[in-house]
Image: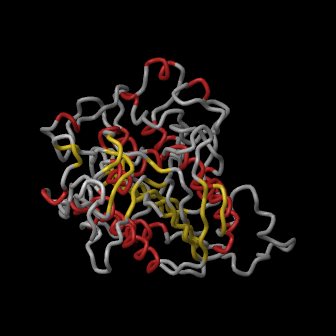
Amino acid sequence: MEITARQMPATYNTNAQVPDSAGTATAYLCGVKANEGTVGVSAAAVKSQCNTTRGNEVTSILKWAKDAGKSVGIVTTTRVNHATPSAAYAHCVDRDWYSDGDMPAEALQSGCKDIARQLFENIPDIDVIMGGGRRNMYPRNTPDVEYPGDKKHNGTRKDGRNLVGEWTDRMKDKRGYYVWNRKDLFSLNPNNVDYLLGLFEPADLPYELERNKETDPSLTEMVDVAIKILRKNERGFYLLVEGGRIDHGHHDGKAKQALHEAVEMDRAITRAGLLTSIYDTLTVVTADHSHVFSFGGYTHRGNSIFGLAPIMSDIDQKPFTSILYGNGPGFKFVNGARENVSTVDYEQNNYQAQAAVPLSMETHGGEDVAIFSKGPLAHLLHGVQEQHYIPHVMAYAACIGQNKGHCHTNSGSPSLSHISPTLALLLSIKWLLC
């Protein structure tokens, strides 16, 4: 994408130097720093304590755009009720309360709602929703439509509600469609669709390298359909796009999976650029946090990024890969010494790169990340800023939210010539060390 501005946002949560994805999503979507593990609530809310929710809810730029008459959408390769997308619509003190089946009895009795339920109730007319997470929408033990013989994919809801069925009933006279596979998605003409719910897996979508191209759409394909539906609104649109499985690949120590997810994210950004205009669309690309992922070893130009460094360790006289992790599941000792990576297939898709500290799951990093932007007022995203600055810039550019004094003169005409009434917003989130 053409870059007109670059910034370095600080990612820490209010109670954590190294953040999690829930607190960071609240920052760059709602404009306030938050505690680790919470979404759509301020730092006054305490993780997992239901009674600290009420009065501490914060709204997101997705809601500000919807309230301004724009169309809005969410596209992700994770569950649609995962940490990042949920901060756009939910107010929850625990990011893991995917359905009521994941909540403690005390929280349910106190009136807290699971995130899947909030997806359909808090902002009931989100125009486009695509990702995974089917099992959290159906009653417990309901067989999955795609994997009916696999009980781990069955519905999880204890309240007996069929949230997909309720959505379908509500949208049947509003040109709304529910799809659960790629074929049905591409059978739709975006010009004849006003609302779309696409849930393509019971949980997260598969890694791009493992995607069934007959049943699951790619991130790029979902973005293409989403924009074609949303851009019909003459007032513009806001779209949140998350390449969330980049993060999962790193947590698994599977650098090849993570980086191929990043390549797919890049394709989606390119496609979005072709479908929009730099003159009326502010596009923002950033990460919510980094990972303890490194790339070094003085490798030569043309060397596979997944290959070996050209030198041996001068301590144990063994080779090492150019990609390494500070911690994670790739820590391996063989006969009391570091594994000799030349004896394994380090270029296979699920190879777990060596890590310095053994952990079952690799951790996030705490450094600042990059943010890239183009379009109207993109120059406001530069230098080093706090992460929660991001949605305020986007709202300012779009003339939505609370700060709109710069948008119109006393005559009612726009006072900024580059602010278009059809300004569209695209926020693309990728989870990659920058």
Asked which quadrant contains residue 4, the reply is bottom right
137, 360: nearer the viewer: 360
Tell which residue pokes out farthest to the right in this image: 410
| Vertical placement of residue 329 versus 401, above or below | above
Residue 260 percent location from the top left of the image: 30, 65
| Vertical placement of residue 255 versus 227, above or below | above
Relative side of 248 to 105, left or right = left
**Total tally of numbered discs in the picture:** 0
The answer, for residue 220, to whether it is visible in the render is no
Relative side of 40 to 241, left or right = right
Relative side of 22 to 183, left or right = right
| Vertical placement of residue 164 versus 243, above or below | above
Residue 394 percent location from the top left of the image: 64, 64
Residue 77 percent location from the top left of the image: 35, 55
The answer, for residue 19, to whether it is visible in the render is yes
Please name the residue shown 54% across and 39% down the image: 36
404, 170: nearer the viewer: 404
Please name the residue shown 53% across and 24% down the image: 111
Asked which quadrant contains residue 195, the reply is bottom left
Please name the residue shown 45% across and 56% down the image: 74
Relative side of 357 to 408, left or right = left
By what rule are the colours in the image chosen?
A: secondary structure
Residue 151 percent location from the top left of the image: 18, 34
Please name the residue shown 55% across and 25% down the image: 49
160, 298: nearer the viewer: 298
218, 332: nearer the viewer: 332
